[in-house]
Image: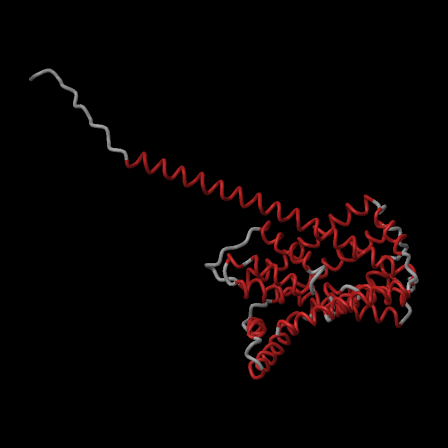
Amino acid sequence: MKVRRIVLGIVSVALAAVLIILIIRIGNIDLHSTWHEIKRASRKALIGLVLLNVLLIYLSTEKWRSVDAALRRTSDPIPSRTAAFGFTSAGMALGQVLPIQLGMTAARTVGTYFYGSPLKRGTAGTLLEQSFDLLNVLLLAVASAATWFLGGGGVMWLLTATGMIALALLAVAPLIRLARWLASRLARALARRNRSRENLQKFFGLLQSGVLSEKLTRRLVLLSAARYVVVVLMAGETAAAVGASIPLWHIAAAAPFAYLATVIAATPGGIGVNEMTLAGVLKMFGTPFSIAAPWTLANRVLGVASCFLVAAVAAILMGFQKLAVSGAARKKSANGVVNSEVSDAPPKPQVEESGPPR
């Protein structure tokens, strides 16, 4: 089994390298010039990219916390917002070098280990909240395909995309019923085929248990839509940073297909697959491949740097929070000992006042 995993890993990395080489060849990319553009990237755009990345991780954290509130037992401790943000930022960074779903799931599962029910809260909770990102990009892909087929522009894409999200919000109740029905069918199929897929069975079991309410579902749809907007704005900042002239609506229309390609990608972090898909779809919408291809490489480099920077800062903040909590606990314990010593001290003898003899 180990040999098979090693071979698959090598093949995955090789495929990523081949795709990157193809992008460079097809786009006639001058790597020296592209690297020079990355190094002299606009500082304002880079600051905007980092701030948007913080917002993106915050929205992802709020999605997961919403699901976690529905999954956890009443006896389970609740991670602080700082800790949850730290888990999510670590998962986002790992998703740059590992399959995105695996990186985020692993980070949150490890993070919730000391808070109880890590498989349910970390693994299943992450799969559940990320399924709404998938739902949103499927709807947005329909909007993009319709816009391209009808030869529309940015306004048409925006109106169609807004309509698709509004339709999803209106269809919450039947979507929940559909999700539960599919979950029951998949859970039974997995139970018959292979018992080693126990985690997936538990995940589908959670969907059947009624953990999804209409209120929670609408919140997750809206947060996923907001997260998508931030992703597009981040891509716009990387384009501005390296001076790539790409209309923002082209990026918004192409991004759903890049996301879907990354979900099924067999390369670490979707490297190569994401770039090839994004550049190809941008070309379909009118952005020349010679502009789109080098931008996708710059977007990858700047995105990775931004994710790891935010993750490092989040780890430092988590460390400070842990020190503060430990210090407060020690201080409280010390005060308790002092108070205990005071309360256990023998009472002072009382001296009766001697009055005049009667």
Above or below for 183 versus 89: below
Where residue 121 appears, as percent x and y from the top left, is 55, 63
Q: Quadrant of residue 245?
A: bottom right
Number of on-image labels: 0
| 309 and 73: which is toward the camera | 309
Task: Give the side of residue 22 with respect to residue 229, left or right.
Answer: right
The quadrant holding residue 348 is: top left
User: In which quarter of the view is residue 355 placed?
Assistant: top left
Farthest-out residue, bottom = 192
For image coordinates 77% across by 50% down, the residue present is 49
**Foreground of the two, 47 or 195:** 195
In the rendered image, the quadrant that contains the N terminus is: bottom right
Give the percent coordinates (x, y) of residue 177: 62, 75
Image point 89% across, 57% down: which residue?
A: 246
Color style of the picture: secondary structure
Q: Indicate the position of residue 20 as horizontal and vertical percent values.
A: 83, 64
Residue 112 visible at all? yes
Q: Is 109 placed left or right of 25 in the picture? A: left
Say whether residue 164 is visible: no
Residue furthest to the top in view is 356
Image coordinates of residue 139 in percent, x first then y, are: 76, 69
